[in-house]
Amino acid sequence: GMPVEQNPPALSLYEGAESGLRCNFSTTMKGVQWFQQNHRGRLITLFYLAQGTKENGRLKSTFNSKERYSTLHIKDAQLEDSGTYFCAVEANSAGNKLTFGIGTRVLVRP
Amino acid sequence: VTLLEQNPRWRLVPRGQAVNLRCILKNSQYPWMSWYQQDLQKQLQWLFTLRSPGDKEVKSLPGADYLATRVTDTELRLQVANMSQGRTLYCTCSSGLGGTSQNTLYFGAGTRLSVL
């Protein structure tokens, strides 16, 4: 199967709501990164995690290397949070070579 | 603050023709530069990482052939040839390699290629 699986494939939520995205990977990874791709195609770096949890404003991400998953939580969703969210993993000897999931398309409605 | 400048932003490529892309690094604290492609199904895939001026690599993937060159400490180039399907090429940079937040990747705005 795919080395990086993201779910759900798509998510719709109303402004002010919260939801979580998940990324599962098939082997132990050294790190995980999350990106948001907006409607113009720009890829915005959200988080790098080698372990544990990070929080930035309304976004929070966790990385469990042992259980082989990462999550991204969005709270108090805003219209500008719409876009496609990608997780990307860094294998043990990969350097700058990240393996990307297929993304979760998020639509925030007013 | 923009770390990377890519040009052109968009190009229509006649079938059989090659196209040359450029990426300029604006902050020398992020010298590890890479190319990624995004296909029409939105799948992102690593192509190359080139650190030193003079480094060159070639690769063939479904739908295109690539030649990447690190020209200088601040310039990365990519030649795309024999493209049969449209795609977007992204340049990235990071401050280091491996296992720490130094490997955090930052993306340029991308060059969108369409086949004529």
Image (cartoon, coloured by chain):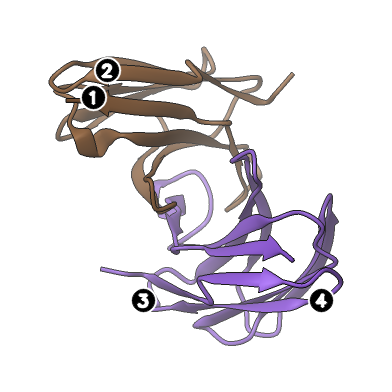
| Residue kind at label 4, given as amino acid type | Gln
Q: Residue furthest top?
A: A67
State the mark number for residue B17: 4
Q: CA distance from mark 2 to mark 3?
A: 37 Å
Q: Quadrant of residue B37?
A: bottom right
Residue A17 position, x and y percent, is 18, 16
Q: Chain of mark 4?
A: B
| Residue kind at label 3, given as amino acid type | Asn
Q: Is residue A94 above or below residue A1?
A: below
Classify mark 2: helix, strand or loop: strand
Q: Is residue B33 above or below residue A23?
A: below
Q: Residue furthest front?
A: B116
Determine the colour of chain A.
brown
Residue with the mark numbered 3:
B27
Q: Are marks 2 and 1 in contact (CB under 8 Å)?
A: yes
Residue with the mark numbered 1:
A109
Residue with the mark numbered 2:
A13
| Residue kind at label 2, given as amino acid type | Leu
| Residue kind at label 1, given as amino acid type | Arg
- Residue in view at x 17 percent, y 31 percent: A78
- Residue in view at x 55 percent, y 67 percent: B33
